[in-house]
Image (tube, grey):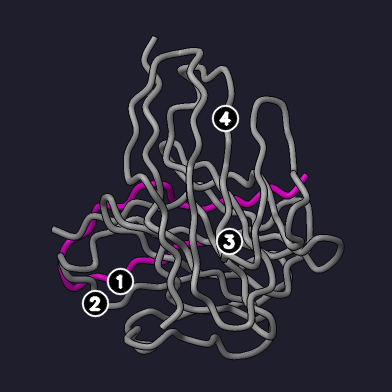
Amino acid sequence: GAVVSQHPSWVICKSGTSVKIECRSLDFQATTMFWYRQFPKQSLMLMATSNEGSKATYEQGVEKDKFLINHASLTLSTLTVTSAHPEDSSFYICSARGDSGRKTQYFGPGTRLLVL
Amino acid sequence: EDKVVQSPLSLVVHEGDTVTLNCSYEVTNFRSLLWYKQEKKAPTFLFMLTSSGIEKKSGRLSSILDKKELFSILNITATQTGDSAVYLCAVGQGGSEKLVFGKGTKLTVNP
């Protein structure tokens, strides 16, 4: 139980293009999902908290117009990196928090983005 | 500023050794402390600790929390090469969904 998937796992794109990353909770409902970013040898940095049916809450310093988050259902949240630039290259990980029981965050496998 | 500090940053041991990983925190409105194991991809959940002095155990791994001294340790006994990973400590805050992560301890277990 508590499986979270992400798609795609790898993305290589040209500078200026937009990239959409999907995060799905496969066997549980998640009112709340989280998007993290991880640079090499660094820890996970929370970018935003995504709530189903409402606007995402962004952390300080994260541009909401650049990192668009949509949480359209209880099992799907999407992160769109708009007009990607090389400095956006990173490992993006989502997590989903169960709505019942222990409410631990379960992580997806991550998406590695490389912007050329 | 909320912070979670893990030590050591990296550790190299031989199979069969016992290791202790440390996590200290300064976080407002502490609610829980979590340990994750991260191999090549996303972190996998190990333990969640909310009460002081109560050891959580899963096989060769165990963890305990000291809320007075604001730290936790993760012990791994009889290490195996499959234990090689980055171990992340994270603290959850009351009234918030957020987790504050430490930088992790990279453990390498050599045969």
Q: Is residue B74 magenta?
A: no
The residue carrying pointer 3 sits among few (fewer than 14), some (14 to 19) or many (20 or more) residues within 10 Å by Cα, namely many
Q: Is there CB contact under 8 Å for labels 1 and 3?
A: no
Residue under pointer 1: A18
Q: Earlier along the polypeptide chain: callout 1 or callout 3? A: 1
- On the image, the x and y values in percent for residue A59 come to 43, 84
Of tags 4 and 3, the one toward the viewer is 4
Q: Which label was assigned to residue A95?
A: 3
Assign a secondary structure to mark 1: loop
In the image, residue B24 sits, relative to residue B10, either above or below, namely below
Report, in whole angstroms, how far the alpha carbon at label 4 lies from the one at label 2. 44 Å
Assign a secondary structure to mark 3: strand
Residue B64 vs residue B80: left or right?
A: right
Amino acid type at circle 1 is Ser
Assign a secondary structure to mark 4: strand
Report, in whole angstroms, how far the alpha carbon at label 4 lies from the one at label 3. 26 Å
The residue carrying pointer 2 sits among few (fewer than 14), some (14 to 19) or many (20 or more) residues within 10 Å by Cα, namely some
Q: What residue is rendered at 67% in x and 37% in y?
A: B62
Assign a secondary structure to mark 2: loop
Badge 1 sits on which subunit?
A
Of tags 4 and 2, the one toward the viewer is 4
- On the image, the x and y values in percent for residue A115 come to 19, 60
Magenta segment: A1-22
Amino acid type at circle 4 is Ile
Report, in whole angstroms, how far the alpha carbon at label 1 lies from the one at label 3. 22 Å
Quick one: B9 or A72, which is closer to the camera? B9
| Rendered-image quadrant of the N terminus of chain B | bottom left
Q: Which label was assigned to residue A83?
A: 2
Quick one: B90 or A3, which is closer to the camera? B90
Residue under pointer 4: B76
